[in-house]
Image: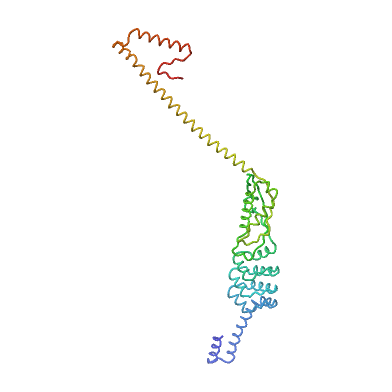
Amino acid sequence: MHQFLSALAAAERAPGLGELDVWVYVLIGVGIIVLVVIIIVAMFFKLWLQAYMSNARVTFWDLIGMRLRKVNARVIIQSKIMAVQAGLEISTRDLESQYLAGGNVPGVVSALIAADRANIDLNFKTAASIDLAGRDVLDAVRTSVNPMVIDAPDPRAGRGDTIAAVAKDGIQLKAKARVTVRANIARLVGGATEETIIARVGEGIVTTIGSSETYKTVLENPDKISQSVLAKGLDAGTAFEILSIDIADVDVGDNIGAKLQTDQAEADKRVAQAKAETRRAMAVAREQEMRAMVEENRAKVVLAEAEVPLAMAESFRSGNLGIMDYYRMKNIVSDTDMRDSIAGKDKKKPGQSGA
């Protein structure tokens, strides 16, 4: 504008320009200004009118600032109108900050309205932090008002639809639980999710069944499982408050104890067989050693008997053995062989091995 007025003054001082020409420039400048104003009004008039009629207190300057900051003015105005109509005091700057931070502004406002209707203590700062943490704040408020039921185990996880545990008597039980939880908005940021609840409930069921003396005790009183698990305070550090744990189904599975005993017996049998085979191999080796020793001793006997005729000949030469002594010895040997034959003994010559 200042440059335009300077140009206009210079035009007045310029020679050859009349008063009419000056007013032409003035009208052109005014027309440009009016055109810009009309364009701005046309762009934001509808949103401004909606905000004005809803008592949302949003000025044209706010709308222009949103345009310059690349904020979706329609989202902000509609969220502001929702908050005003619900009786909530939320500033336009807070809504813009949430939008620029990448938050879901309509979702946050809807959650605040739902919390206000349900008398839940929830302010904009808390709701915005929950939303920026990646949690659905509106769903959290709804869950806080209407508790939801979680299946344990989760069928969608693909790990089966029951929790298997073994009692002290070795009988396996398969249980299914339904956990009723309510969202704890105060612990929603940084709190554990549904998966932690499911894992803790499963652990509690396994512990309770495993500490039971017999499987019949569990079948007679399945409510003891829920009471024991609920008393452990499984919702500590989670974003939920456990209201109840109900055992939906308990089935008898396999006799795990008998299977373990059978497997142990089979293992012991294999160990015993291995030890017996070792002893048999040692016995066979010992037998072969003894046979070798027998053959060795028989060879020694044969060698000793081979020296007998030489000794007898030496005795004949030295006069220590007479001819009659020799015949008497032969008669004794013949008599001994005859008696052995009558007795049925198998006479073996020296060096001859048995079959």
In the figure, residue 107 lies in which quadrant?
A: bottom right
The residue sitting at 42% across, 10% down in the picture is: 335
The residue sitting at 45% across, 28% down in the picture is: 286
Q: Nearer the viewer, residue 53 or 222?
A: 222
Scheme by which the image is coloured: rainbow
In the image, 78: left or right of 308? right
Where is 111 relative to 333, above or below? below
Q: Nearer the viewer, residue 180 or 95?
A: 180
In the image, 314: left or right of 347? left
In the figure, residue 29 lies in which quadrant?
A: bottom right
Q: Position of residue 134 (x, y in %)?
A: 60, 64
The residue sitting at 68% across, 52% down in the picture is: 224
Q: Position of residue 6 (x, y in %)?
A: 54, 88
Q: Residue furthest front?
A: 320
The residue sitting at 63% across, 66% down in the picture is: 186
In the image, 313: left or right of 147? left
Locate the N terminus and report the quarter of the image it occupies.
Answer: bottom right
Q: Position of residue 148 (x, y in %)?
A: 68, 59
